[in-house]
Image (tube, rainbow, N blue to C red):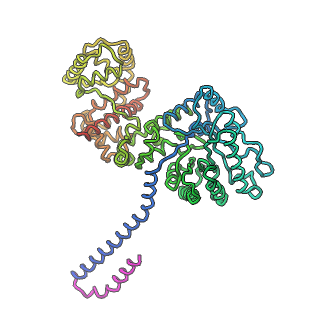
Amino acid sequence: TTLLYTIKFEVMSTRKKSRQRSPECKEGRKDKKHDLLHEICLDLFTADVEKYTTLGNEKIETLKNLDLFVLDNSIRETTVGSLRGHTLDDKRAILKEIKKCGFKHYVIESFNNETRVGDMLLETLNDANEDLSGAFAFSETWDVVKKEIPQEEPIPVGMRKCKQFGVPNVIIEVDLAYYKVNYEKFDAADVCKMVQKRIEWMRENVSKDSLILVNLRDMSEAMAQQPERVWKVVNFLSTLSPGDRIMGILLEDLGKYDKDHLGGWTKAIRNEMMRCGWEEGQLLVHVHEQWGLMQGNVLEMLAMGGTGIWSGVCTEGAAMGHADSCTTIINLIRLGNTKVLKSMNCKYLREAAINVTKIVTTKKPYERQPIYGERATDMVFGFVFSQMAESQASAEVPEFNLSEFLGLTSEMRITTMASPEMILTKLIRVFGDDRRFTLSIAEAMKSEMLSNMGDGRKEEYNSPSGLAMLFDQAGGKITPAMAETIISAKKNSPYIDVLIEEVKEKWDLYDAKDGEADDCVSFENFYNGFMAPYFGCYRCEDSQAGLRALDMDSDGTVDWVEFKYFLIWAGRQYPQVKTSQELVDLAFRHGLIPAMIDELNLNKQI
C-alpha cells in the first residue's frame, strides 16, 4: 500500500513536467507507470493468495495423513430424537451393517433404570456368545444431584449395567456447564475426583482392561463460558500415570458454534494433552446439525488435532441430525487419505448409510443427501466434486473409484459389439447356469441382433426380459424363469408404452427448436430438456464426454431411437414404475449414466 501511495505521489508530482514533453514521451511514461502499478498489484494479490491458503494446505496435509479412529454410534445416535423407536430386529440389523463396514468399536447402548431394547439386544448377544470386546456404553458420572451438588452414591446405572451385561468399555459423560450444578460448591477439581473414582470402579468391577472414554458433553458451552474448567479436566486426564491413563476424550458440539471456535478449542485441548505427554490419547469429535455446517466443522476439528470421530454411519440422529461417518470418511478419501481404505471397508459405507437410514425411518435417504442420497450419482458428471474425486483422489488414492463407491458398478451390456462369449456369460448371470445356454445359441443371438439392426429395428437386450426375448427369437428353448420374465414384460408393456409416449411429447418440443422435426435433438437441447437434473453443468468437459457417449452414431445429436432404447430398458427392468418422469429418472440413474461411465472408461483405456 505504501508503495502504491508513493507511486501515486510521484505520478502527481511529475504531471506538470509531463505537460511540456512531447505526446509520445508522455504516453511512454504513462505506460511504464501503468505497468509498474500492475506488477505491484499482482505481487500483492499473489502474496495474499500464498498467505491465506498456506494454513489451508497444512490442514489438508493433516487430514490426508490422519489415521482416523472411528467409534460407531449408529445403534444409539439413530434412536435419539427418532419419531420411530428401534425394535430388537432393527438394532440387530444396524449392528450387522456396522460390522460390514469394518468398524471395530461401537456404542451398544445408553443405559438408564428402564429396560430398553438395548438391554434385550445385549441379552440375545450374550446368549449367542457374541464378542463384545469392541462394545461401549454411555454412563453418567453422577445420577443424583442434591442441593446443587452431584452425589457419589449410587454408582451410576450405566456402569452397573455394563457389569450386568458384560459390556467392557464405557463412555463417562461429564458436564462442566450444567445448570443444576453449582460449580462454586462442586468445582472442576471435584469433578476430576469423581471421574477418577468412576474409572477405578470400572476397572475393579467390570474389566481391568476396560477402554474408557470421557465425553465432555457440553464442551462448547464450557469453553465459551468457563474454559478453565475444561483445562482442569483435560490436564487431570492427561497427567494420569501411564498405567492409569484412559483411552481418550470425546468432544461434542450441538451445532451452535462455528468452525473457528471449534477448531481453536480442539487445538487447545490437543496441545494440552501433548504438553502432558499423552500423545497416544484419542480425541474424538461429534457435531450436530443446525446451520448446515456440521461436516465442515468436523473436518476443521480433525485438522486441528482431533484423532477420530464418534458418529453414526448415516446422518439420522438427535434434532436435525449429525455429521455422519460415511460423509466424513469419503471426504478424507477425496483429499487423498489412504489410511482409511486400509482400516475399514470404505466401499460398503454408502450402502450401509442407505440401509441404516431405511431401518430407522422406513424410507430411503433424502434424495439430495450428499454422498448417499440418490442424487449423489449426479456427482459423477459435470460438477466440481467429480473432477476432484476422479482426478485428485484417484491420483492420490489409486484404490478409490467414485463410480464404484456410488453403486454405479460396471455391467456387461449386450449390444451388437458384444461377443458370443459375453452374451453367454450374461445369460448365466441373469438366469443361472442351464444346459440350454451354449456358445452356439449365443452366436445365434448375436446374429439375430445384427439381423434386427439390418432391418432397422433397434431392440433392447439388457433387461432380463429383453435378453430372454432375444434368446427366444434366436431359437432357444426358454426356461421357466425366462417365460415368467417375458410374460410379465408383455403384460406391462402397454402401460410402459403410454409412459414412453408422454416422454415423446416432451421430446418433440425440443426436437422442434431447430426448426426441423426429425427425431434428433442437439446436445444442448437434450441437456436442457432431460439431462440437467442429473448433470452439474452443460459446458463441463465430462458432461460433454457423456453426451458424446450417448451419441451412438456420432452425428453430433441424440436420436430418439437412442434415448427410447433406455426408456424401454427402464420399463422392463422396473415394471412398477408409475409416471413418465420416474421412467426417465430410472433410465438416467441406472441405465444412461452407468453406460456413459463404461464408455468413458473404455475411451480412457484406448
Apparent side of residue 395 relative to residue 110 in the rendered image (left or right): left
Q: Quadrant of residue 419?
A: top left
**Is 12 a magenta residue?**
yes
Q: Is residue 186 above or below residue 112?
A: below
* Towards the viewer: 226 or 503: 226
Kindly identify the residue that appears in the image at 44 percent across and 39 percent down.
346
Q: Tell me the residue at 41%/47% (across/down).
A: 334
Residue 7 pos. (x, y %) = 35, 80
Dominant SS in magenta: helix
Residue at the extreme left of the image, as rendered: 454
Count of numbered marks: 0
Give the quarter of the image for residue 3.
bottom left
Image quadrant for the C terminus?
top left
In this view of the protein, which residue sits in the foreground, 30 or 345? 345
Which sits in the foreground, 90 or 533?
90
Q: Is residue 360 magenta?
A: no
Q: Left or right of 174: which side holds 413? A: left
Q: Is residue 605 visible?
A: yes
**In this picture, which residue range is highlighted in magenta?**
1-23
**Quadrant for the N terminus in the image:** bottom left
Which residue is rendered at x = 33% and y = 74% of the image?
37
Query: In x, y percent, where is residue 422?
Result: 27, 25
> Which residue is depicted at the point 53% across and 49% down?
294
